[in-house]
Image: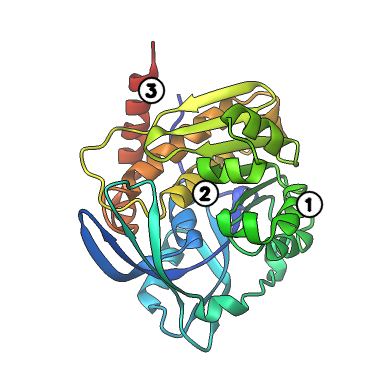
C-alpha cells in the first residue's frame, strides 16, 4: 500500500522552476486580494509532502519574508531564488459558475519579465526536474545547465502554444513527462479527439502525457495504455487557481519519492499511483483560496484521502 513518508535523500529532491506571484482572485465563493500564488509556489508546497526541493524563481522586494520562511521550513531550498529590485509578478483573475475556466483581468509581470534562471552549483546534479510554465527557451536553458537528469517534467499553457509554438516543440524533445489541460492538448496537437491528441503529442517527445481535466479528473497516456483517474467529489470548492500546479507537485513528488527513474515508463503502476496522489493534493488546494488549505493539510490527511480514492475506484 502506498504511503507518505517524506524522503530526505538528496538524490530524491526535485529542482522546480517557475513563477512566484501575488494573485487577486474572485470566485462565486468570495474573493482574495494579493494572496501568494504562482506555479512554483503551488508545485513546491505540494511536492514537499513527499521530498525536499530546490526552487528556482524570481520575486521582488515586496515579497514577504515570512513566506520564504514557510517554504524553507518545508524543506524547500531557496538558494536559487532571486530577490530583484522591483515588484513581484501580480495576476488578477475571476471565475464564473464554470470553475474550470479563469478569466484574466490583469497580468503585471514586473520582475518576472526579466527572469533568466541561473542554477547554483549544487543544483546542476538534480535528477528530478520540473520545468514550470515559463518561456520555452528558458525551460531549455535550465535543462542545458543540468548534468544528467533522470526525469524531466514540463508544464505549459495556451500562450506559449500559440505564441511560441516552434520553441515549445523544441523544448518538448527533451521532456519525459508533460502535464497540460484538455484545451491545451487540443491546441497543441491540432486534433479534435482526445486519443488523437495524445498520440500526436507523444510523438513530439514526451514518454508520458497527463491531460488534466479539472473536476473530471485526469488521463495518463503511456506505452502501456491509458489510465483514467477521477477527481474527488467535494462539497466545498472555493478557488481552483493553482490546482494544476498542485497536481503536478503531487505527481512529481511521489515519483521522486519512489526514485524508480526511467523504470516508470516500463511498468507504469508507479505513474498511476502518482496521478492519484496528484489528484489528492489538488483536492485540498481547491477547498480554500490560494494554498491556505494545503499548508494546513497533514500527511495523515493526505493518506486518508488517497484511501478514499482507492475505495471510490475499486470494483
Q: Which mark is residue 310?
A: 3
Callout 3 secondary element:
helix
Q: For mark 1, give the secondary structure.
A: loop
Disc 3 residue crowd, few under 14, some 14–19, many 20+, Cα 10 Å: few
Contact, mark 3 vs mark 2 (Cβ under 8 Å): no
**Identity of the residue drawn at 34% across and 50% down:** 285
Number of numbered discs visible in the structure rendering: 3
Residue 93 horizontal side relative to residue 168, left or right: left
Q: Quarter of the image holding residue 233? A: top left
Q: Mark 3 or 2, which is nearer the eye?
A: 3
Q: Position of residue 281 (x, y in %)?
A: 39, 43
Q: Earlier in the sequence, mark 3 or mark 1?
A: 1
Mark 3 → mark 2, Cα distance in angstroms: 23 Å
As helix, strand or loop, the secondary structure at mark 2 comes to loop
Q: CA distance from mark 1 to mark 2?
A: 19 Å
| Residue 258 in sight in this render | no
Q: Which mark is residue 81?
A: none
Q: Residue at x 45, y 38 (%)?
A: 213
Q: Residue at x 46, y 40 (%)?
A: 278
Q: Of tags 1 and 2, which is closer to the observer?
A: 1
Verify CB contact (< 8 Å) between mark 1 and mark 2.
Answer: no
Identify the residue under disc 2: 51
236 to the left or right of 114: left
Is the residue 28 above or below the residue 92 in the image?
above
Q: Circle 1: is it few (<14), some (14-19), or many (20+) Cα within 10 Å?
A: few
Residue bearing mark 1: 148
Seen as rendered, the residue at the extreme top is 315
Q: Nearer the viewer, residue 193 or 109?
A: 193
Horizontal and vertical percent position of residue 18: 56, 63
The image shows residue 311, relative to residue 144, as above or below, that is above
Amino acid at each position: 500500500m502506498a504511503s507518505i513518508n517524506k524522503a530526505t535523500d538528496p538524490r530524491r529532491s526535485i529542482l522546480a522552476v517557475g513563477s512566484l506571484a501575488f494573485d487577486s482572485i474572485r470566485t462565486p465563493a468570495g474573493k482574495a486580494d494579493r494572496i501568494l500564488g504562482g506555479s512554483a509556489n503551488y508545485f513546491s508546497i505540494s511536492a514537499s509532502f513527499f521530498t525536499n526541493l530546490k526552487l528556482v524563481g524570481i520575486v521582488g522586494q515586496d515579497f514577504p519574508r515570512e513566506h520564504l520562511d514557510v517554504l524553507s521550513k518545508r524543506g524547500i531550498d531557496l538558494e536559487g531564488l532571486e530577490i530583484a529590485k522591483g515588484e513581484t509578478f501580480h495576476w488578477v483573475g475571476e471565475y464564473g459558475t464554470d470553475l474550470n475556466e479563469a478569466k484574466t483581468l490583469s497580468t503585471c509581470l514586473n520582475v518576472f519579465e526579466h527572469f533568466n534562471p541561473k542554477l547554483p552549483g549544487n543544483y546542476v546534479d538534480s535528477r528530478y526536474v520540473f520545468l514550470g510554465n515559463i518561456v520555452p527557451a528558458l525551460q531549455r536553458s535550465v535543462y542545458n545547465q543540468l548534468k544528467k537528469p533522470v526525469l524531466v517534467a514540463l508544464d505549459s499553457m495556451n500562450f506559449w502554444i500559440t505564441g511560441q509554438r516552434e520553441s515549445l516543440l523544441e523544448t518538448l524533445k527533451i521532456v519525459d513527462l508533460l502535464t497540460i489541460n484538455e484545451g491545451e492538448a487540443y491546441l497543441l496537437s491540432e486534433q479534435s479527439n482526445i486519443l488523437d491528441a495524445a498520440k500526436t503529442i507523444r510523438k513530439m517527445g514526451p514518454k508520458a502525457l497527463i491531460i488534466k481535466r479539472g473536476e473530471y479528473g485526469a488521463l495518463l497516456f503511456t506505452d502501456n495504455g491509458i489510465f483514467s483517474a477521477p477527481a474527488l467529489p467535494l462539497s466545498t470548492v472555493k478557488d481552483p487557481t493553482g490546482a494544476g500546479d498542485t497536481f503536478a507537485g503531487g505527481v512529481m513528488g511521489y515519483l521522486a519519492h519512489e526514485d524508480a527513474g526511467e523504470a516508470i515508463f516500463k511498468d507504469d503502476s508507479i505513474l498511476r499511483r502518482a496521478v492519484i496522489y496528484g489528484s489528492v493534493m489538488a483536492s485540498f488546494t481547491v477547498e480554500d483560496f490560494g494554498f491556505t488549505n494545503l499548508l494546513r493539510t497533514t500527511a495523515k490527511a493526505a493518506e486518508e484521502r488517497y484511501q478514499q480514492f482507492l475505495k471510490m475506484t475499486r470494483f
